[in-house]
Image (cartoon, rainbow, N blue to C red):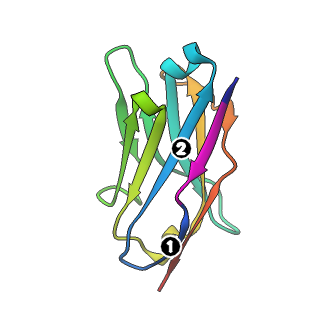
Amino acid sequence: QVQLVESGGGLVQAGGSLRLACAASGHTFKISRITLVWFRQAPGKEREFVAVVSWTWSGDEIYYGDSVKGRFTISRDKAKNTVYLQMNSLKPDDTAVYLCAAGVGSHPSYDYWGQGTQVTVSS
């Protein structure tokens, strides 16, 4: 099993920044080959892909959703089994619950989910 714990959400003014963290713990073998992704879900909207750090044999691959490219940066600290989402130039449209999910391997099903962290951007 793998457990995910998110942190770092909060209230920020438009144009500001926040950094989210998703810490993984549990099965050592699975964590060493884990792909971690951020989704977000706003009230009344569908879940949206934000960013992913995808594990591969040749190293991590990173992808972003179109709405956050150039503003958000995802990174992984392997020593801490933690993925960070640095969010800059925040907009009110970024307001959502941000969810961290994980799966084992390069293109996994996301079997493990965190509890979510609220991000609210005021105008």
Task: Count residues near mark 1 (Cα–Cα under 10 Å), then give few for <14, some for 14-19, many for 20+.
Answer: few
Task: Count residues near mark 2 (Cα–Cα under 10 Å), then give few for <14, some for 14-19, many for 20+.
Answer: many
Position of 72 with respect to 93 (left or right) is: left
- Which of 12/59 is in front? 12
Determine the image quadrant of residue 71.
bottom left
Look at mark 2 in the image and give the residue it sits on. 22
Residue name at image x 40 percent, y 19 percent = 56
Residue 52 magenta-highlighted: no
Amino acid type at mark 1: Asp
| Mark 2 residue element | strand
Residue 36, percent from left and from top: 51, 35
Question: Where is the N terminus found, in terms of image quarters?
Answer: top right
Determine the image quadrant of residue 112.
top right
Q: Is residue 91 visible?
A: yes
For residue 105, above or below residue 36: above
Mark 1 vs mark 2: which is more N-terminal?
2
Residue 5 magenta-highlighted: yes
Residue 104, percent from left and from top: 57, 21
In the orientation shown, which residue stands out farthest toward the bottom? Answer: 123
For residue 72, above or below residue 54: below
Q: Give the dominant element type of the magenta stretch: helix, strand or loop.
A: strand
Residue 63, percent from left and from top: 38, 41
Residue name at image x 55 percent, y 39 percent = 23
Position of 23 with respect to 58 (left or right) is: right
- Which of 54/83 is in front? 83
| Disc ID at residue 93 | 1
Tell me the magenta residue range: 3-8
Q: Are marks 1 and 2 in contact (CB under 8 Å)?
A: no
Determine the image quadrant of residue 95.
bottom right
Amino acid type at mark 2: Cys
